[in-house]
Image: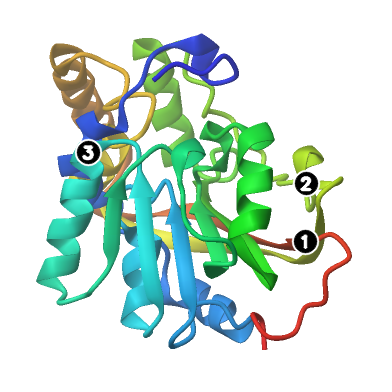
Amino acid sequence: MKLQHVDNARAFDWGKTSQDYAAYRTGYPEAFYEVLAALGIGKRGQRILDLGTGTGVLARAFAKRGAVVTGVDIAANQIAAASALAAQEELNIAFQVCAAESIDFPESSFEVIAAGQSWLYFDPAVMIPKVLRLLTVDGCLVLTHLLWLPLKDCIAQQTEALVLQYNPDWKGAGYRGTMPPVSTWARDHFDLRTFHVMEAPLEFTRETWQGRIRACRGIGASLSAEEVEQFDAAHRTLLEAIAPETFTVLHQMTIHVYMRKGGIAHTALA
């Protein structure tokens, strides 16, 4: 895949990261889902579509809470990993290999449409009318992010510097923790129901942080296997110099909940 606004249009393929993604990108802490639950998102029986599901991090969490979940992703390897993890957890989730822009479900099929750190890869001009058609009249679009904070965390900062040595096109570095409450693309079509920002130190070992970084777009999804191996060796050396065997990396979690413009928020978020 190539997108003009992502990494100087450098090609990337999330399917190349699936093994590391499944093992090391385990997702959000429980407190994050407690906030979603308080907002009425992920409740039992709720029909949820998870766009860009990857290995099914959000999809599996919602299914564990009793929601009826469909997950779609453009990468077949990601869907294979998601299906395997769901089977291990005895979860019934309808996974499909499909680009988000190509989804086709009956009108008003879902009370929630979610995108975990994936909306930037979609074409808003295509997705907005699809989302509005597929949501129930009082349904919601939920966008979530889990991002480390390099300006507040020295391990994240030095890891990013190393990533940029191997992939200077990567645009994921230097996040300042300033997520806008309302995105420009949303203003004409959605009202912001709520916006939440949380920070938490997430625990890693050197091995799991290495795996987490291999599974990022700038490394595993973009570099050749040989380049990934070279980076990983350099990253191991860096961590041995700057980090204890077990450490934390400060992350920010955000939740945007959008409703259709002029809609009434009651059933979906009751």
Residue 187 lies, with reference to residue 161, above or below; the image says below
Q: Mark 1 points at which residue?
A: 260
Three-letter code for the amino acid on which mark 3 is drawn = Ala
Dot 2: element: helix
Label annotation for residue 186 = 2
Q: Mark 3 points at which residue?
A: 76
Task: Give the residue displayed 55% in from the left and 35% down from the top.
Answer: 122
Q: In this view, does 5 lie to the left or right of 200?
A: right
Residue toward you, 245 or 54:
54
Asked which quadrant contains residue 91, the reply is bottom left
Label annotation for residue 67 = none
Asked which quadrant contains residue 241, the reply is top left
Residue toward you, 222 or 245:
222
Residue 157 visible here: yes
Residue 45 lies, with reference to residue 236, above or below; the image says below
Q: Is residue 81 left or right of residue 164?
A: left
Dot 1: element: strand
Residue toward you, 107 or 190:
107
Q: Distance between the residues labelled 1 and 2?
A: 10 Å
Q: Distance between the residues labelled 2 and 3?
A: 29 Å
